[in-house]
Amino acid sequence: MLVPEQQEISLRLQAYQKTIAAETASSNKALVSMVQRVGQRIASVSKRTDFQWEFNLITDPQQNAFCLPGGKVAIYEGILPVCQDAGGLAVVMSHEIAHALARHGGERMSHNMIAGATL
């Protein structure tokens, strides 16, 4: 990969902070608690104690979730009915967290750098 992990984390942190600032945090305490609980359990087995894990539930009907490098996770309320329960939420969250752990964002950035250099 052409992008160092710390640079990737720094760049994505800025994007995450903008997204969180622009969105409305969920006020549903039970759902927020479930997202926090499930997220912390996954983070505890991720072997990335250097990540500053953060789990947010966003009030939005879209069926989506994401995890950025460094452990910044956002879940949109619209995906929760699809998840049905904490087990389903764990599947969605672990999928998103796996992308960050595998550095798929860094791969994409590296590919874009190569593609830009060859044009």
Image (cartoon, helix red, strand yellow):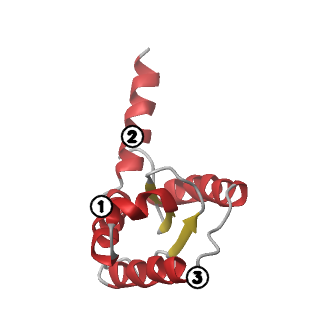
Give residue 119's quadrant in the image: top left
Residue labelled with disc 3: 29
Query: Of callouts 3 and 1, which one flags the residue occurring earlier in the amino acid sequence?
Result: 3
Q: CA distance from mark 2 to mark 1?
A: 17 Å
Res. 96 in view: yes
Which three-letter amino acid code belongs to the residue tagged 2? Answer: Arg
Q: Nearer the viewer, residue 40 or 37?
A: 37
Dot 2, crowdedness within 10 Å: few (<14), some or many (≥20)? few
Residue 72, horizontal then vertical, whole percent = 51, 66
Which three-letter amino acid code belongs to the residue tagged 3? Answer: Lys
Q: CA distance from mark 3 to mark 1?
A: 24 Å
Residue 67, horizontal then vertical, whole percent = 44, 60
Residue labelled with disc 1: 95
Say what secondary structure mark 3 lies in: helix
For the residues labelled 2 and 3, say whether their Cβ atoms are less than 8 Å apart: no
Say what secondary structure mark 2 lies in: helix
* Residue 52 shown left or right of residue 42 in the figure: right
Q: Residue at x 55, y 68 (%)?
A: 57
Dot 3, crowdedness within 10 Å: few (<14), some or many (≥20)? few
Q: Nearer the viewer, residue 27 or 118?
A: 27
Residue labelled with disc 2: 108
